[in-house]
Each structure stands twice: as C-alpha cells, then as structure tokens.
Amino acid sequence: MRTDKLLQGEKVFLRPLNVEDLDTYYTLFFDSEVRRLTGTKQVFTYAQIEHYIANKWQENDSVLLLICLQNTEEVIGDIALQDIDPTNRNANMRIAIGQAKHQGQGYGSEAIQLLLEYGFGILNLNRIELNVFAYNKQASRAYEKAGFTVEGIQREVLFYNHEYHDSISMSILAREFREKYRK
C-alpha cells in the first residue's frame, strides 16, 4: 500500500510524480484520442520526460499530481495546478485521463474536486481557471458539473488535424467552490 497518497477520494487518490513513474508517465498519453482531446501535438522523447520529472520538484509555481485508482493503485492520468500566482491568489488547472476505459467513470470529477479542495484550502487560492477545446464536450460538462463557469471563447486558437478549433475559458472562485461543496 502506498504511503504517498497526498489527497484521498473514494475512487481515486492523488500523489506526487517521482522518478519511479518514468515508464508509466512516458506511455500514459500515447492514445491518439487523449492527445486530440488535450490538443497535444508534440511528441516527447523518453529523455525529455526523464528531464521533466527530475526537474519538476524545483518548480514553486505548479503542483503536478498523478491520478491513481484506490482499489489497484494504477496510474490513470495526471492533474495539475500551474502558473500559481500567490499574490493574486489564482492558478490554471489541467487534467488528462490516459485511456478511454477510465473516462466517464467519475474518476476525473473526483480528482478535480480533490485538487480544488487543495487549491482553495491549502494554497488559499481565490480563482482557478482552465481552458477546454470546444470539441471536448465530455470535459466541458464535467467542468460545469464541478462548478466552473464559462467566461469566454478564444476563437480558432488551436490548429489540429487540418482544422481550427475554439477554446473555452472557464473558472471557479473559492466562494463558489465552498457554496457547492460545503453544504
């Protein structure tokens, strides 16, 4: 049983990424549909991932956690707060679930709730924002369900697979999170 379960939910737990995760992290996002949903174009080498993991702990403006299943401890994705601005108390969130079989199971929603709790509670943030591509309807619904509000649309911001795509900007404020989850 792992002892590095930073944030605990019913279905998933979130834990820090470490060097032992190199092979898993390298292969986690090879799925073409996951790459499309996240707008990932760059192909990373093993050495680039190794360098990324080795240097991640030095960053003080981000928190990167792996999403793991409670019952098997399998790593199914990652979630992060990025560009943390302690002065203005805001950050950007991103999440990716690595395989379609783990999507639509509530794992991402629970991971989001855990990370929001951490961001608003431990980090004392006031605002967390994200962007989702307009074609990723399942993610948009999950973010709205989690309490995020649409703020605007960045038109044709992504060129992927010979087409331009819009990006939807969303955010949630600490008071909105408390109203939703602290009833």
Image (cartoon, rainbow, N blue to C red):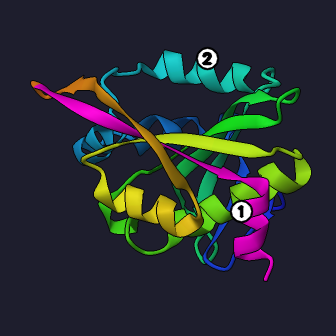
- Magenta range: 163-183
Whole-Å distance between the Cαs marked 1 and 2?
Answer: 37 Å
Residue at screen point 43% across, 44% down: 28
Q: Is residue 121 magenta?
A: no
Q: Is residue 168 magenta?
A: yes
Q: State the residue in front, 74 or 166.
A: 166
In percent of width and height, residue 83 lies at: 69, 26
Regarding mark 1 in the picture, which secondary structure is present there? Answer: helix
In percent of width and height, residue 116 lies at: 71, 56
Regarding mark 2 in the picture, which secondary structure is present there? Answer: helix
Amino acid identity at mark 1 = Glu
Q: Which residue is label 2 attached to?
A: 51
Q: Quadrant of residue 59?
A: top right
**Which quadrant of the rendered structure holds the C terminus?**
bottom right
Point out the tag, 1 or 2, that comes first from the N-terminus: 2
Residue at screen point 71% across, 62% down: 176
Which of pointers 1 and 2 indicates the residue nearer the eye?
1
Identify the mark at residue 176; answer none if there is no mark: 1
Image check: 70 left or right of 132? right
Amino acid identity at mark 2 = His
Q: Residues within 10 Å of mark 1 (few under 14, many from 20)?
A: some
Residue at screen point 34% across, 20% down: 42
Identify the mark at residue 7; answer none if there is no mark: none
